[in-house]
Structure formats: structure tokens, C-alpha cells
């Protein structure tokens, strides 16, 4: 591992078009975009389990300001990772799981103003999306009630989410 890490983390051999897919933060070590690219490079080298984090999704306040930046950090890089794995023939054998440890309520937490409000933790309902690894793309498993507060259809316990969802879908509501 010690001899392989310098080559793994040296992005000088990556073509410019590959780097651009991940967005401008790909050049900033430790950024989510850089870590997505490193995840692809690890997968190419046969690493069997890779976990990425994007910290700071805990918007009890300042949701409108924070969520835009966090989506900017994750959307392009996550899509680039999926495309990159597919283009390199790695997606069929790689399961990508994107989710968090809990959902968010759909209603406001704290004072509601036009530019500052938040949402509380919601352990009952949340979404996990899956790609690759034999997942049937374009399907949804599970549903919430009209208020997104309770599970209305096909409940899946968080411990069973990937087991059940791997045979069912690419986008799964787990709770």
C-alpha cells in the first residue's frame, strides 16, 4: 500500500477531459470531487470497498444557503464517478450507494424566514440511490405518505436496504 499510494494520488496522468468531468474542485485535495476521482482510481486497482464522505448536511438552520453549496460539491462529481465507472467497464461489478444515516423532515425547524430555516432529523423515511452492481435502473421501491412523514408502501429497514434494494431498484425509499 505504501508504495502504491503515491502513484494512486498522482493525478498528473489523468487526461484533462477526465478531470473536467468531476468539476473545478477535483484539483483540491480532500474535496468531494477529488475523492470521487480517487474512488474511481481505487476501483480500477481492485479495491473492494471504498467509502466517501461529504460532511455538513446537518441543516437545522441556514438550509437555503448551505444546500446549494453542498449540491454544487456533490452533484457533478457523483455523476462523473458513475459515468467514469461505466465508461471503463467497472460499473457492472461496482455497486454505488448514495445516502445518509437518516432523512430530513419536509417541514421547517426553527423560525421560518425567506432566507433562513432548517429541517430536523427524520429516522422513518429517507432516500438512498443505487447505481451499478446489477441494479435495475429507473425503478423506485417504497413510498411515503402525502406528507413524506410515514412509510406508506414497501417498508425497508435500514439494515436491509442494500440487500432488498439490490434486487429491486436504482432509487429506493428506505426507512
Image (cartoon, grey):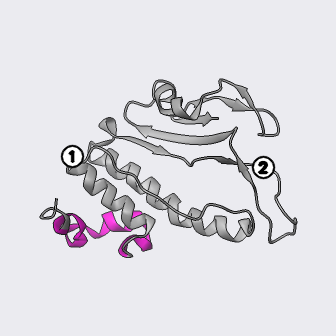
Chief SS of the magenta region: helix
Q: Position of residue 111 (x, y in %)?
A: 87, 66
Q: Is residue 78 left or right of residue 110?
A: left
At a point 20% along the width and 51% down the height, the residue shown is: 45
Q: Is residue 58 left or right of residue 14?
A: right
Q: Position of residue 12 (x, y in %)?
A: 21, 73
At a point 39% along the width and 54% down the height, the residue shown is: 81
Q: Which residue is mark 1?
A: 46
Q: Is residue 35 above or below residue 42?
A: below
Q: Is residue 127 magenta?
A: no
Q: Is residue 51 above or below residue 149?
A: below
Q: Which residue is mark 2?
A: 106
Q: Position of residue 25 (x, y in %)?
A: 43, 73
Measure the alpha-carbon separation of dots 1 and 2. Answer: 40 Å
Q: Which residues are magenta?
A: 6-27
Q: Is residue 16 magenta?
A: yes
Amino acid at each position: 500500500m505504501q508504495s502504491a499510494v503515491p502513484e494512486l494520488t498522482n493525478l498528473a496522468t489523468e487526461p484533462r477531459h477526465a478531470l473536467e468531468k468531476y468539476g473545478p474542485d477535483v484539483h483540491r485535495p480532500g474535496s468531494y470531487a477529488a475523492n470521487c476521482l480517487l474512488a474511481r482510481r481505487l476501483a480500477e486497482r481492485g479495491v473492494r470497498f471504498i467509502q466517501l464522505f461529504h460532511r455538513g448536511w446537518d441543516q437545522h438552520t441556514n438550509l437555503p444557503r448551505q444546500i446549494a453549496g453542498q449540491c454544487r460539491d456533490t452533484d457533478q462529481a457523483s455523476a462523473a464517478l458513475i459515468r467514469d465507472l461505466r465508461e471503463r467497464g467497472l460499473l457492472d461489478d461496482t455497486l454505488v450507494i448514495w445516502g445518509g444515516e437518516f432523512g430530513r423532515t419536509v417541514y421547517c425547524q426553527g423560525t421560518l424566514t425567506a432566507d433562513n430555516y432548517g429541517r430536523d432529523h427524520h429516522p422513518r423515511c429517507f432516500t438512498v440511490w443505487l447505481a451499478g452492481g446489477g441494479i435495475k435502473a429507473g425503478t423506485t421501491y417504497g413510498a411515503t405518505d402525502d406528507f413524506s412523514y410515514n412509510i406508506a408502501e414497501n417498508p425497508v429497514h435500514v439494515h436491509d436496504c442494500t440487500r432488498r434494494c439490490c434486487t429491486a431498484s436504482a432509487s429506493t425509499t428506505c426507512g
